[in-house]
Image: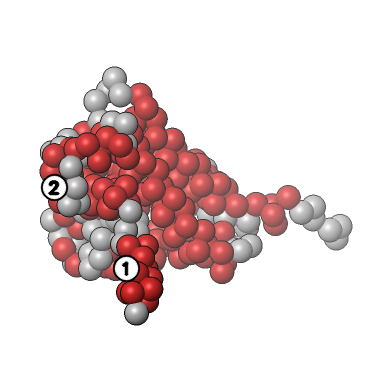
């Protein structure tokens, strides 16, 4: 009987989240809701049910924790991106449309849950960019590289879709995506300008691309008459 009891205790202990995981999960939620500067180590440790000693055993500094939080949000976003565009491989315009449409769904979903890529209060990395001091190159570079990759991907999709000025179209689409998320701060539940993002993206695509022309078709030589 005592052996069974011991095994039950061991299983319960193994099911309990590690202290480091509790600290990270708690910090991620607090950072997104209140900002990385407003949330201190004491608040994180208290909310996670631990203490500062355990915090610094898990993370050498608050900046290390913030860096891991930002990188985690990047991974979640790229996972979402890849899952959205994968079903439309070979159709760049449809991939762009799917990203726009899914942005609304993502914002609606994340308004109800704190898990995964956070968007209910804007982009987690965009919010952090406002708070990161200019001399903090480590954290600043994480955000800059992330936003640069979004820009690169959208420009590449625009080029594949046959845009006459792929860089301009890609940048315009990025403005739609970024701006749309932030309007949710003042217009909840997708009732504000973000509701028009799909139509606006369609107008941009129609105006900036040649119907039936993609990067692949543009490279194919014409047959002789």
Q: Could you tell me which residue is drawn at 44 percent across and 50 percent down?
A: 75
Name the side, left or right, on which 200 lies relative to 131: right
Which quadrant would residue 216 be assigned to in this image?
Answer: bottom right
Disc marking residue 119: none
Disc marking residue 46: 2
- Report how many numbered discs are placed on residues in the image: 2
Q: Could you tell me which residue is drawn at 47 percent across and 57 percent down?
A: 79
Name the side, left or right, on which 187 lies relative to 143: left
Q: Residue 181: image x %, image y %? A: 27, 54
Q: Could you tell me which residue is drawn at 35 percent across and 24 percent down?
A: 137
| SS for callout 2 | helix
On-image quarter of the N terminus: bottom left
Q: Does residue 148 lie above or below 116 as drawn?
A: above
Work out whether mark 2 precedes mark 1 in sequence or the reverse, and give the earlier one: 1
| SS for callout 1 | helix
Which-is-in-front pick, marks 2 and 1?
1
Mark 2, Cα crowd under 10 Å, few <14 / some 14-19 / many 20+, is few
Residue under label 1, please give it: 9
Q: Residue 171: image x %, image y %? A: 42, 43
């Amino acid at each position: 009987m005592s052996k069974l009891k011991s095994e039950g205790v061991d299983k319960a202990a193994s099911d309990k989240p590690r202290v480091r995981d509790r600290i990270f999960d708690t910090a991620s939620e607090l950072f997104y809701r209140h900002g990385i500067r407003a949330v201190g180590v004491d608040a994180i440790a208290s909310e996670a049910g631990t203490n500062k000693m355990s915090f610094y055993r898990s993370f050498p500094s608050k900046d290390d924790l913030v860096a891991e939080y930002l990188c985690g949000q990047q991974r979640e976003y790229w996972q979402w991106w890849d899952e959205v565009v994968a079903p439309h491989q070979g159709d760049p315009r449809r991939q762009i449309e799917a990203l726009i449409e899914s942005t609304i769904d993502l914002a609606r979903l994340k308004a109800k849950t704190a898990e995964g890529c956070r968007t209910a209060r804007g982009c987690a990395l965009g919010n952090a960019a406002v708070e990161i001091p200019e001399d903090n190159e480590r954290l600043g570079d994480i955000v800059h590289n992330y936003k640069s990759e979004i820009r690169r991907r959208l420009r590449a999709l625009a080029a594949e879709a046959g845009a006459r000025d792929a860089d301009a179209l890609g940048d315009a689409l990025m403005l739609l995506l970024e701006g749309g998320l932030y309007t949710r701060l003042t217009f909840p539940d997708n009732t504000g300008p973000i509701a028009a993002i799909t139509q606006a993206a369609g107008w941009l695509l129609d105006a900036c691309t040649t119907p039936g022309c993609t990067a692949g078709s543009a490279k194919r030589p014409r047959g002789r008459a």
